[in-house]
Image (cartoon, rainbow, N blue to C red):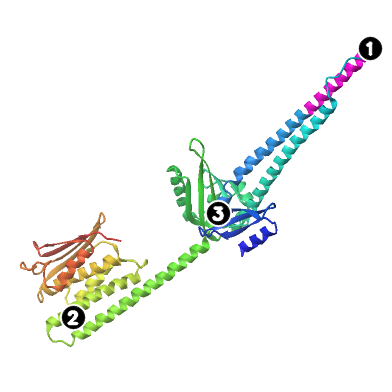
Amino acid sequence: PQIGIAADDIRNGVGGHIDTIDPATSKEVVMFYEPIETGNYAIVLVVPPEEMFAGVSSIRSDLVSIYLFSILFMGLMAFIIASSFTNRIDEIVADFKKISGAAIRGDLDARANTDVEIDLNLIPKGLNEILDALTTYSKELQNSYELIRKMEAAVNSSRVVVFWWKNAEDYPVEFVSDNITQYGYSLEEFTSGKVLYGNIIHPEDRKIVWDELQACADEGKKNFHKDYRIVTKNGDIRWIHEDTSIQRDEEENITYFQGTILDITERVEAEESLKAMEDIRTKEIHHRIKNNLQVVSGMLYLESLKFKYQEVVDSFRDSENRVRSIALIHEKLYQSKDLVSLDFADYIETLTDHLFHSYNVDQKNVKLVLNVEDVFLGMDTAVPLGIIINELTSNALQHAFGKGEKGEIEIDFKKVNEVFTLIIINTGEPFPEDIDFKNTESLGLQLVTNLTSQIDGEIKLDKTNGTKFKITFRENR
């Protein structure tokens, strides 16, 4: 609709500007248009809002200088013209005096050296040429001022606020566009120094913004971009995006900061709403997966009750615990704050407690020792690692300790220099010498070996003092 309005204006010989979207960049732009009287054409200028006012103040200064120069120039030319005009008239008068004096003395042959008609015609002709040039120059100057006025009007009717800040803490303001009033502040409050720009930045963001701006300046960068919060005069908090150009002199010393701020509160709130919706969706997914896995675990348990052979019952129970270990991952993720990582120390504690109850192990006989750091893991690492802990702990509870035998299971988990180390030790029956844990028919040990490879880890078995499995790996995010 805006383009249609501009087209109608051009056909009617009317100039102006509109706010529209650049189809090439999909960004907000301001389009200026001015029809040409001599043909069916128009001059069109498309400027991004944040760049539109970048040079206006410098143009203003240049035009003021040109304007002052033109006044001095016109005064000088008037003096020269007046001098030339009066000098020539003096010469004509002198010639006439010379002729009249000669005539009184009886000398009638004296003649004037001046062609009065030519001289008197050339003086106004030259004067007119000078005045025509000055008139043209004055019109160009007026057109430039008119362009600045239109650009200022376009800026002040937009959401983009233009600033010039001094290179000092809290951003003392040298210039600000009139539309700063959209945040409740007046132009005079900033230009008088009563309010510094740093005063309106949210207290929690103020130091961050200043430190990052100074870091950009110290690194020799030309531009600074940042999203942060400001506080309006009535106390509302608004999110803004700042685009600043760092201006330097010939010696690379910073002279001032020239930039724009744009209110992006609606965009930020929309992004936060989308994130909240995504979090809810993710939580629902984890919740449903956990419930479904618990149903599977329950079905395996009920199915195991149909069998009398202990070996079959144990197989069902092992499968039930494997499913339970995965379900527990999704339960912990559902309860986590960010929904993508879980407190693995809490997970290990909950998992091992479930295993001790599942295998009816009396903790008075078999003691559980946990030395686990507060480490957060993503699901891609937590699921395979959870199954590994489930298998090695279950294996120790089933095979390392006889009925009523006392012992200890220790689980250590820590992170040093981005390397995770998991150690599971039991003091019960040693691991059989004739079994290669990496090449065995045991499904549990096959899972341990394969899942260690899946997380790009390394597993070692030490049978020197009890049974000690050590797994090291790095988390791949």
Front residue of 243 and 19: 19
Report the residue marked by disc 2: 316
Q: Position of residue 416 (x, y in %)?
A: 24, 55
Q: Residue at x 67, y 61 (%)?
A: 8
Q: Secondary structure at mark 1?
A: loop
Residue beneath disc 1: 106
Quadrant occupied by the N terminus: bottom right
Q: Which residue is denoted by mark 3 in the rendering? A: 48
Q: Are marks 2 and 3 in contact (CB under 8 Å)?
A: no
SS at mark 2?
helix
Calculate the distance from the C-alpha at mark 3 to the C-alpha at mark 1.
85 Å
Q: Can the viewer see residue 345?
A: no
Q: Nearer the viewer, mark 2 or mark 3?
A: 3
For marks 3 and 1, give the one nearer the viewer.
1
Q: Position of residue 410 (x, y in %)?
A: 17, 65
Task: Tell me which residue sits at (80%, 32%) in the image.
Answer: 124
Q: Which residues are magenta?
A: 82-107
